Image (cartoon, grey):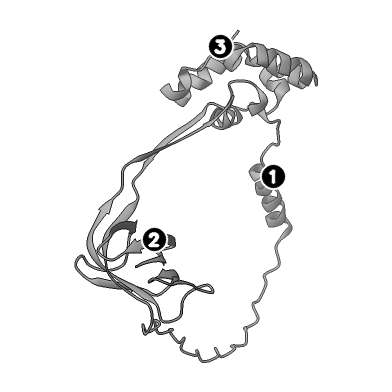
Amino acid sequence: MYAIVEIAGQQFKVKKDQKVFVHRLQGEEGSSVSFNNVLLLDDGKVTIGAPAIKGAAVTAKILKHLKGDKVIVFKKKRRKGYRVKNGHRQYLSEIQIESIVASGAKAPAEKKEAKKAPAKKVAAKPVAVKAETPAKKEATKKTAAKKSTKKGDDLKKVEGIGPKIAEHFNNAGIFTFEELANTEVSKLQEILTAAGPRYKMHNPGSWPKQARMAADGKWDELKVWQDAHDKGIE
């Protein structure tokens, strides 16, 4: 006799005394759990649920809680200098099937939500608005002008420049392809060195040249150049 049952969002084909690893269950080690979402049952006669079999259930005992094997998740974006490596271990529970019941199992009781009394509406008190003086209005305009950020080009289109490097260049006052093309390589290297050892290793030698092609709208020529030079290194 076997059954196909849904446990913690996964479907398993189980038999009596079988041990199964499932996603972490709520419950202490040694406690019993019951699963009522039985999709198929074979006790000599196959019964298929629609979607679950009414009255059928699978009971099991939690043997232990543990973690699965480590899985390495590596992400990379080509030409962006983006690489992220993470490890993951899934929380699991080992259970042993104790019994499979074809009928007569009680369905889990549905929780009834208590009715909440309607909140009393409180009339909002009128708020007095103070009129701004001309001097204060002028100061507010100046503050807003200072907070506005300069909109520039997407420097990441230059081979070798990623989001973080583009951000460091923006902080140094380089926003457009034209500004990048007119910046000395030594100055770019100074910005990378100040950003830390992670960025110091990059070679900005070709970046002004690429930025000049981008500023002049020579995108086809830039693409051909980038395809011929790995990571923008001449």
Instruction: Look at the picture and state if 29 lies above or below 217.
Output: below
Q: Secondary structure at mark 1?
A: helix
State whether residue 188 appears in this view.
Answer: yes
Q: Residue at x 71, y 61 (%)?
A: 133
Quarter of the picture containing the N terminus is bottom left
Rate crowding at label 3 as few (under 14), some (14 to 19) or many (20 or more) other CA atoms within 10 Å. Answer: few
Closer to the chain start, of discs 2 and 3, is: 2
Residue type, label 2: Lys
Q: Which residue is mark 2?
A: 13
Residue type, label 1: Ala
- The percent position of residue 198, horizontal first and vertical second, equals 44, 24
Question: Is residue 110 toward the left or the right of residue 135 in the image?
Answer: left
Distance of label 3 from label 1 (alpha carbons): 32 Å
Closer to the chain start, of discs 2 and 1, is: 2
Distance of label 2 from label 1 (alpha carbons): 66 Å
Question: Is residue 181 toward the left or the right of residue 101 in the image?
Answer: right
For residue 214, which quarter of the picture? Answer: top right
Q: Secondary structure at mark 3?
A: helix
Which residue is nearer to you in this view: 126 or 156? 156
- The percent position of residue 171, horizontal first and vertical second, equals 57, 31
- The percent position of residue 120, horizontal first and vertical second, equals 56, 91
Q: Which residue is mark 1?
A: 145
Q: Nearer the viewer, mark 2 or mark 1?
A: 2
- The percent position of residue 194, horizontal first and vertical second, equals 46, 23
Which residue is nearer to you in this view: 97 or 63? 97
Q: Identify the disc placed on residue 186.
A: 3
Rate crowding at label 1 as few (under 14), some (14 to 19) or many (20 or more) other CA atoms within 10 Å. Answer: few
Question: Is residue 92 toward the left or the right of residue 115 in the image?
Answer: left
Question: Is residue 84 toward the left or the right of residue 80 in the image?
Answer: left
Residue type, label 3: Ser
Q: Looking at this view, name the residue that lies furthest to the right.
A: 217
